[in-house]
Image (cartoon, grey):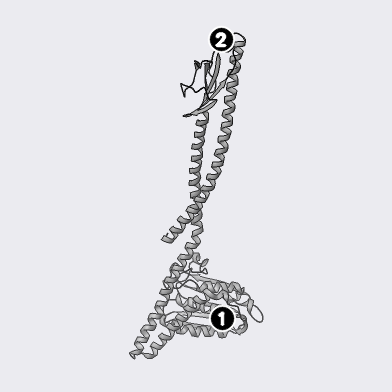
Amino acid sequence: MNKNEKKALISFLTIYIGSAIFLISIMLYLYYNNEVRMLKESCSMEITSASMEIKSEILDSYMKNKRFIPKEFASEHVRYALYDKNKKLLYSSLQGERYVDLSKSKYVKDIYDFYIIKLNEPSVPTEYIVLESCREYQNTNKLKIYILIVLILSAVFIGLIAYFLAKILLKPVREKVEHLDRFIKDSAHELNTPISVLLTSVSMLKKGKKPEKMMKYILSSSKQISQIYNDIHFSAFNASNEDVIEEFDLKDLVQESVDYFNDISITKNIEIKAFLDDCTLLMDKTKTQKIVNNLISNSVKYSHNNSIVEVSLKNNILSVKDYGIGISKKEKKEIFKRYKRGSNNIEGGFGIGLDIVKRISSEYNLKLYLDSTLDEGSTFYIDFSSVIIGAKCDINDKEN
């Protein structure tokens, strides 16, 4: 992952995780406030119930002329103390404070809540009932810890989800950048050979050495550069061009391409042989030329030196056969994808030539076939039956 990708990933994760945590924090804050409110109400009800129980027992004991015997509550959250009219302690199970402020009805000290109830019964010596509880504090602390754990786990979960989402979103961008980087490198490599040959030939020509041969090399290199430029231009800007449908003989067009590439293939000492029948088409001539040129160019590129390329046009089917490196069964499925090149490719190339052939074939509903054996060669077939003027033939005729 390069510097820009890391920067984009960090920015995405920061914004995504930050906004998600912010929204979750708001929801947890509202949840916390609601739970605290319900907890206070619950504690208040518990204290009220406890105070009424104690008050009832005290009054009941003195009405029956019995001595009130304090007892502990079953609840561990509530404890109490009793004071007489002189504020003298009669009984206490309090834990939080020894000296209680009896002038207040409710107050909080440290972790304890104190509730003071006054009996106002002249015949009863007990005047003050003090109730102590730390349940609200304890439960509030537990709630805070719970919310903190939820927030941390949510942040971790959201972070993982955000990371994998970012990787998924960045993957096609990264692949595109890698394709572009490779395309630029391949462009430099692909152009290097014809330019080097061109410069060398011009230098030799100036010295008067083998002028006829040097002129052939200059012509070959110039045509290679022209072919490379045309492929790049077509691949990048073809979407903005409108088709010009016209009638023409495919035989003449193929013959022009054969003559054109015979000048190019001279550097590898490859001979292109043509076996052509008449075939009148009705389609865009420029795109047809692209199909033929790229098939022949591909065959020349991946043929061994001192070999031949056979171009045949019979029964409306164009076939281009080479005796080069061939294509494996696994690579046949992806060889027509843009920027895709064989794993054993040592001849350079952009990986856009066959993509152009595939795109134009699909546009005109032309049937495209590939027959290849690794280390023996490849044959590309294109059936032009869908765009010919006259009777159509079956693709099986290609084997005749």
Between residue 296 and residue 64, name the one nearer to us: 64
Q: Quadrant of the N terminus?
A: bottom left
Examine the rendered structure and indicate whether residue 216 appears above or below residue 189: below
Compared with residue 84, is residue 176 higher up or lower down, i.e. above or below?
A: below
Give, as a three-letter code, the residue at label 1.
Answer: Thr
**Which label is found at residue 286?**
1
Whether 52 is drawn above or below 199: the answer is above
Residue 67 has which mark? 2
Determine whether label 2 and label 1 are within 8 Å by CB: no
Which sits earlier in the primary sequence, circle 2 or circle 1?
Answer: 2
Which of 13/379 is in front? 13
Q: What distance separates the C-alpha of mark 2 from that of mark 1?
A: 116 Å
Q: What x and y, as percent, mark residue 358?
A: 55, 72
Residue 327, image x, y percentages: 48, 69
Q: Quadrant of the C terminus?
A: bottom right
Label 1 secondary element:
helix
How busy is the neighbourhood of tag 2: few (under 14 within 10 Å), some, or many (20 plus)?
few
Asked whether the viewer can see residue 196, the reply is: yes
Tag 2: residue type?
Arg
Going 54% across and 74% down the picture, which residue do you hit? 357
Residue that lies at the very extreme toward the top in this rendered image: 65
Q: Can residue 2 be seen from the camera position used here?
A: no
From the top left corner, tell me how far across and down residue 154 is, in percent: 51, 45
Q: How many marks?
A: 2
Tag 2 secondary structure: loop
> Farthest residue in the right direction?
391
Find residue 157 and report its horizontal and vertical position in percent. Answer: 50, 47
